[in-house]
Image (cartoon, helix red, strand yellow):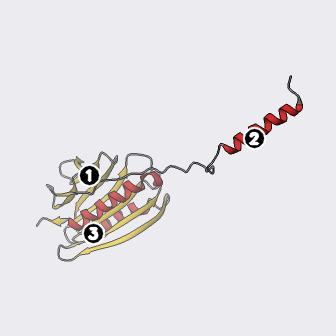
Amino acid sequence: MKTMQQWHKLGFVFCILLLGSCNTELLPKPKAMLRLSYTEPTYQQWDSECAYRFEKSTEAKFKKVGNTQQCWYNLEYPKLRAAIYISYYSIQNNLDSLLIDAQNLTQEHVVKADEIIQEPYSNPEAKVYGMFYAVSGNAASQAQFYVTDSTRHFVSGSVYFKVRPNYDSILPAAQYLQNDVRHLMETIRWKE
């Protein structure tokens, strides 16, 4: 049986070994951050059967929705699990109501949105005027837009993800799609 003095010596030796074995400072493990990277988008002209055309990302696939008389499309992004819903309307003395509907659709997201930034768009040479809405927060749609020539054509659209809107998680994809929507607005042309 060991004496008390022997136990103290063993404890002292153990403490020296324990303290001497660590040469580096102990630090807490840093939080890991998800890194999502997307390829630089490439665009190609898409000529619809409707009264407009524009450049779309090569990552996107078109899906016709609605009946054949309507020019409604979903621009699907399978890798992002998202879509841009695009609707076309012919203006027939109803521009005011189309504008109000587009603005109201955006305002429906105010409840969940942290912020909605409005970016007016104007291209007088191409007769394209509109508004882009960047939505931040856990809203269902991260971007809304409309463009019009103010006399005959009106196109509106919304970005939706096929996942629950957790803004921190979808932010890189939302920014990617917001840039695609801006490109769509800048390249849309009316067929005369």
According to the picture, the residue beneath numbered tag 3 turns out to be: 95
Q: Quadrant of residue 129?
A: bottom left
Residue at the left extreme?
A: 192
Instruction: Give the number of the disc on residue 16.
Output: none
Q: Secondary structure at mark 3?
A: helix
Q: Sequence-wise, which precedes: disc 3 or disc 1?
A: 1
Q: Which residue is mark 1?
A: 75
Three-letter code, disc 2:
Cys
Query: Residue shown at 70%/44% (left/top)?
Result: 19
Q: Nearer the viewer, mark 2 or mark 3?
A: 2
Element at label 1: strand
The structure residue drawn at horizontal position 28% and vertical position 48%, both measured from the top left corner, is 76
Q: Are marks 2 and 1 in contact (CB under 8 Å)?
A: no
Query: Looking at the picture, which amino acid does disc 1 mark?
Result: Leu
> In this rendering, would 110 be left or right of 56?
right
Mark 1 Cα-neighbour bin, 10 Å: few <14, some 14–19, many ≥20: many
Q: Which residue is mark 2?
A: 15
In which quadrant of the rendered view does residue 116 lie? bottom left
- Name the amino acid type tagged 3: Leu
Q: CA distance from mark 3 to mark 1?
A: 24 Å
- Residue 155 percent location from the top left of the image: 25, 62
